[in-house]
Each structure stands twice: as C-alpha cells, then as structure tokens.
Amino acid sequence: MNVADSQRVASALERLGYQATPMIEDAQVIVLNTCVVRQSAEDKAMGRVTSLKPLKEARPDVTINLMGCMVGVKGQEKLRAALPYVDVFSPPSDPDPLVAHLTQDDSRFIELQDTQQRFDAMDDETLILPAEERGSLISAHVPVVYGCSHACTFCIIPYRRGVERSRPLGEIIAEIRSLAAQGVKEVTLLGQIVDRYGKDVPDGPNLPALLRHVNDVEGIERIRFLTSHPNWMTDELLEAVASLPKVMPHIEVPVQAGDDEVLANMKRGYTVAEYRTLVTRIRRIIPHASIATDIIVGFPGETEAQFEGTRQLLAELKLDVAHLARYSTREGTVAARRMVDDVPEDEKMRRLKVLDTQQEGILAEINARYMGETVTVLFEEEVRGRWKGRTETNKLVFVQSESSLRGQVLPVQITWTGPWSMQGRLLPDPAALPILIEQISVS
C-alpha cells in the first residue's frame, strides 16, 4: 500500500512539473512516506525525519512533507509541535495537502508546458508513473479499499488509516487503464481486507465484480489481489478467480495462529477448523492454486502447546508461503492496552526459527514438483545477469537470456528448484512459431 501511495504522490508532483532526483541535496520537495505497523518502523521514520532538520535550516526554501501512517488520519498536533521544520503533514494515501501547499505559493509552483501537454489527455483518475518507471514498471499495486474497520487486537492500521472506504469502480478502472497505457502488465488490487471491497457502498459492486471489470482492461495480462480475510472469502470470489483468465491462482489469506484461544485474543473471528475448511474449499474450486498465509508467534499468553498447534497446522496444510513475524507491543492497539507481552524475546525467536525451518522443507517439497514442468512466467527485470519473473502461482523463476525479457509472458521449462526460487530455460513461444516459419520461407 505504501508503494502505491508513494506512486500517487509522485504522480501528483509530476502533474505540477516536478521531476524525481536521486540526490536529496538537489530536491526542492522531500516526501517521507512512513510505515508504522511495527514500533521499530516508527522509530526509524522519526530518526529519518529528524536527520532532515539540518538540511531545512541550511535551505529554508525546501519543502518537507511527512506522510503516511505516522501522521495518521487525525491527531497531528503532537507531530507538528515536535517537528516544526516539517512543512506539510499528509494522511495515508492523500497527496492533496502537499499539492495545496505547493500551489498556494507561486514561488514554489513549477509549471512546465511540455509536461502539461504530455498529460493533458488524462483525466483526474489516471495515475502518472514516475518518469523512471514509465515504460519499465511491469507490475503495479492499485489500492481498492482504504483503511480497515475490523480492528484485530494487534493491529494499529485502523487507528492510522481510518475506517474502511472503497474506491469507486470507475476510478479504479481508469487508473488501471492508465497504467496499462504506460506499460504495466500486471496489477495487484490492494486492501487491508480486500475481500470487503464494496461492502461499505449500498448496492455497490463487490470484489468478484471488480475483478471481472479489470479482466476486460486491454493491455493488462495478470491480476492479483491481497490481503484476504478468512471471514470474507466467499465461493463467489473463488469461482471468479477460477473462471477469469487474467486472475492468477494465488490466494493470500492469513491465519495468524493455529490455536482457537489465541485467535480469539487476536479478535480474528474464526476458528482453526474454519480456516482448515477454507483451505479445502480453495483447493477444491481452484485445484492448482498457491496459498500464502501470515503467522505471528509469541502473541501475549501464547503457551508452548498453543504454538505447537500453529506448527502442526502449517505442517498439515503445506501452504506455499508463510510470512512469519514475532509479536511486538504496538502502542495504541488493544493488545498493548489490555494484554501483557509475556513471551520472552528469545522464546519468540526460537519459535520463529522452528517455523522457518519447517516451512523451508515444505517449500522445497512443493517446488520440487515443478522439476521438468513447463510454466508461463511474466518477466520483470534483470538481476545480476539473469532475468527474474514469476509464475501464475507467484513462484520466483530465473532464466538466462541475452535478450531483454522485460514485460514478456513466456513458457519456461524448470531445470532446478529450491525452497525460495526456481531456475529454468526458455522454450519457443508456440504463438511465435508460425511467424518464424513464414519468415524463414520468405527469406
């Protein structure tokens, strides 16, 4: 979401004629977009914005914009008092305060005629990618639901990003069309609980309807969405994934823990049995789907037996991805106010390593099934002499090629597998063979 928010700010600044610079010393506008999901992230953000104070003192004309979850949707008075050298405070996903600040002072407002002419055909819902990404960015994130109203006890997001708000369907589609026109081949629809898209709009479209509209956008070849919640993943949504050719068979649906008491303390709203049933439903409706989950170890009160339940659940389900995290107290959350962080840090780390080691073995087993198989890969970029791409099920694949593969969807035969990635060799594209034969016969 933060990547998408940063692109939105960059788009707004490019509309005003600004261009990105790699050197902070050359910048007229500095935007610090903050994440505060964990306390360590907020501490890092505060350290970074504090380090900008000498630059502001040396160059008072520089505009400093603090943005994102650290600012939140309300209660900015303490920040303003602590950081008087910051010019603009922007809530998450909202470039308007910065734009208003820059345009109200003519001395700060840049207006480049060629920039204006370049984008004058675009309406307000389009997203202009930063110049360095335009034509080269293959996969982009598109927020469809802002905020969250579920309020898990460990999560600060509802307090910083506000209540759940769905974006209008037309606005989303216009943005995706503009991304496709700028070379983007894959979009990932974002929401803290993305399955709840449209729930806050009476008679509004739901996520399956949105997916059908995005599936019709010319130029977009792959569609993903995250993050799902077990309570809101319906058969209608799963059947849309199964039936729409551009929607990839990859589901991100966190379980967080493998014990009912821990789940209740987290205020997740489902049981282990219900999550297990959901995984069965996913695999029945989308037989070749890959499934990703999130796990928090060391939540307040989690016993060794409860942790063992989580370990056994992951061993049983054999999911394709498990994002693992140690619980840390987050000021402002229900867990911080009402629960004692009583699992020692060394024990949290031990539990994390146990799951990490187990998951590595599971992934090695899953990926080994791909050996010798042919998969279609969307290639994104060249990394250390090899081209990196992802399969439909979001598996990372590397191949050797002297030609540029950026943005191409190509068949690859897997020649090596590991737990975290695979390697393969390019196969001839069947669609290109008749053209190749015709060219040979002509010559």
Image (cartoon, rainbow, N blue to C red):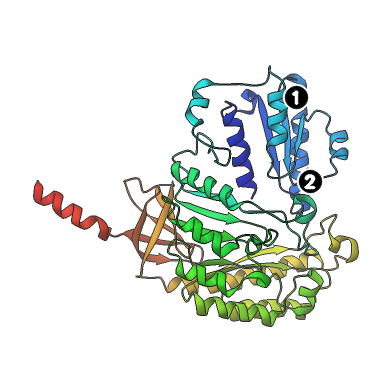
Q: Is residue 226 above or below residue 359?
A: above
Q: Secondary structure at mark 1?
A: helix
Give the amino acid at mark 1.
Lys
Q: Is residue 20 visible?
A: no
Left/right of residue 383 with respect to residue 48 in the rendered view: left
Task: Name the residue rendered at 57%, 30% in the picture.
Answer: 15
The amino acid type of the residue labelled 2 equals Val
Which residue occupies the extreme top position in the image?
107
Few, some or many residues within 10 Å of mark 2 (<14, 14–19, 20+): some
* Residue in the foreground of this view, choosing between 209 and 31: 209
Residue at the image point whose x is 51% and y is 63% from the top = 420
Q: Which mark is residue 56?
A: 1
In the image, taking residue 92 as reference, residue 391 lies left or right, namely: left
Residue 135, position as x, y percentages in the image: 44, 40
**Separation of residues labelled 1 and 2 (CA atoms):** 25 Å
- Residue 288 visible in rendering: yes
Which of 427 and 312 lies nearest the eye of the viewer?
427
